[in-house]
Image (cartoon, rainbow, N blue to C red):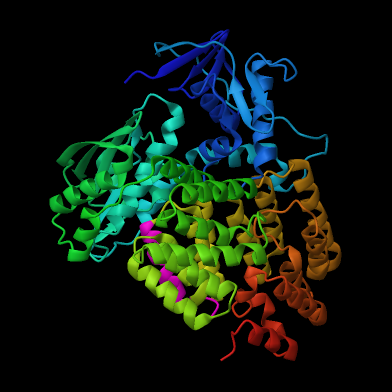
Amino acid sequence: MAEEIIRFEDFELDQGAFELRRKGRAVRLERIPLELLFLLVERRGLLVGRDEILERVWGKDVFVDADNSINTAVRKIRQALGDNPEEPRYVQTVSGKGYRFAAAVVAPSPTLTQTPAEPPFEVKAASTTPPSKHPLRNWLVWVGIVLLLGAAAGVASLLLRQEQKPGSTRIMLVVLPFVNLSGDPLQEYFADGMTEEMITQLGSLDPEHLGVIARTSSMQYKHTQKRASEIAQELRVDYLLEGSVRREGDRVRVTGQLIRASDETHLWAGDFDRELQDLLRLQSDVALAISSKIQLSLAGPTRTRLAGAPTLNPEAHEAYLRGLLAAELRTKESMRHAIEEYEKAIRLDPNYAAAYAELARVYSLASVPRALSVVDSMPKARDAALKAISLDDSLGEGYTILGFIKAHYEFDWSGAEHEFLRGVELSPNDPYAHMFYSNSYLSPLGRHEEAIAEMEKAIAIDPFSGPVQSFLGRTYLWAKRYDEALAQFKKCAQLFPGLAINQERLAQLYTYTGKFDEAIEAETKARLLSGEDPRNALKKEDELRKALKEGGPRAYWMKVLEYSRSEENPPEAYRGPYGEGIIYARMGEKEKALDSLEKALDEHTLAMTEIGAEPALDQLRGEARFQSLLQRVALTK
């Protein structure tokens, strides 16, 4: 099939060759800014918000400093185009909102010939500092890290195909991303929302016999050209559901087809045309049709639920979908925006159980990117989760969030276990139900083998989720199975080379095994991938190496303590009173460590529930003050 070339003034954007050309010659531009340029030109004339840019270019599971990363990419685009930011001809800044591509574009045309391209990246030193022998000082290596992001999907497919263990005897199905046929790029979130809702709908049909791949892994195949058999092999699924969505006014038309992976036979195809308020009914009809074709025996209550699908308030549903989109970005600003959208959905429809459940999820995690304090967010999370369950007691997500709150905020471990088990029972196809049960209950209580088993279940459902893959490594670390933790973190790094949090966890693991040089290297990668200025990150690397050489591990930890008190740190770096407690413990300063941990508990730091499993705190376990802390978080028998 012919690829498209988009022309504006002297420039050409070639989708097939993935390059920018000027007068037939390739213009050097790195992958990230080039992807952003494709997005802006695709949406030409329209505002593209920063949250959408972050999701489309970096992806939901890549943790970066959003403002710094986007600003850097825009600057490189302008340099490549020769665009003046004060009087832009191509990329206009909409203050506080995003960017707009302003140049006139010639209609796309098929690719006929291609000019040989120069290397699609620039290799320029950011400072005059002489290169050191350390590999991360070499900019070619850093460029290689960036280029690896583009190859991540292919590497992931290969590794998962080689290493994924055969699943259970359950039938496995993947819902591929629904195609937006509305002719309006702004409706992309509606098609993505339909994908997510169909995953949820199908996942609740007959969980004992039907497993459904999670959204994160499904969305990896958006705009893919892979055959159904390739996708099925990579995800180990038996069936694939393809679909498209066309929204026109107050009506929505959905076309779906079910494909059997073994022979690529199209078992079923159907068209559904409904009013927007009947969207849940439409989804139920699709689910019933599929259950018939794959010969599921649906329980009576399930059929009753599908047949009695309620009507939706279209405006409330719109707000709900926008909330889903914002929440997936996991930044401070996007979490706050998600709360606003879910609360709007609830104002428009006070009986919207799913909106209450998602609101509970966002509130429960809002303290992680510092969108809200724990004291402010957790009671609101609890109220929203209880309301969701009162409206629909079949929503497993509500119970899972209640378990999270009871564990991390109320220290009610028996109550947490009850809620987590109920959540897993109702939503066994939700990877986060297994993950939260693992890391918020089983690991803190020292039930490490069970915790690892739950993480493996989560990975089987969502193999392309970087956070899930990385958290298995952390689960091994808590179990003090360091060799397996190292192997898992390295595997995750191959699958998701842009995942900063995985590099940070790898750095922490290396300190437990005494490999401080490797820890420094991984820490620097985490800083670079988080969007920290490369000159600052490499300066800190040099300082850490110097401290380690001159003063050994204690001097290393002193320097880490200094960095922990700055604002610029990778996700999950040691920071705040809990992080300081770990650092002081590693330095052997028990009283300072205990002072910090007591302060962390007073501030309701969520990580305090991990003190029973955190290896760094082993040397404090004989101290009376530490035993008092364990009692206060109810971790003593």
Q: Please provide percent x and percent y for residue 331.
A: 61, 48
Quadrant in which the C terminus is drawn: bottom right
Is residue 181 found inside the magenta-colored segment of the image?
A: no
Closer to the camera, 501 or 194? 194
Quadrant in which the N terminus is drawn: top left
**In the image, 427: left or right of 364?**
left
State the image quarter where residue 271 is shown: top left
**In the image, 50: left or right of 565?**
left
Q: Please provide percent x and percent y for residue 391.
A: 39, 62
**In the image, 245: left or right of 478?**
left
**In the image, 11: left or right of 279?**
right
What residue range appears in magenta?
442-461
129 versus 456 height, above or below = above
Is residue 455 found inside the magenta-colored segment of the image?
A: yes
357 versus 408 height, above or below = above
At 55% across and 77% down in the image, what residue appears? Answer: 444
555 versus 343 height, above or below = below
State the image quarter where residue 9 is shown: top right
525 versus 252 height, above or below = below
At 67% across and 21% down in the image, what residue appears? Answer: 78
Chief secondary structure of the magenta portion = helix
Q: Please provide percent x and percent y for residue 572.
A: 65, 60
Closer to the camera, 242 or 345? 345
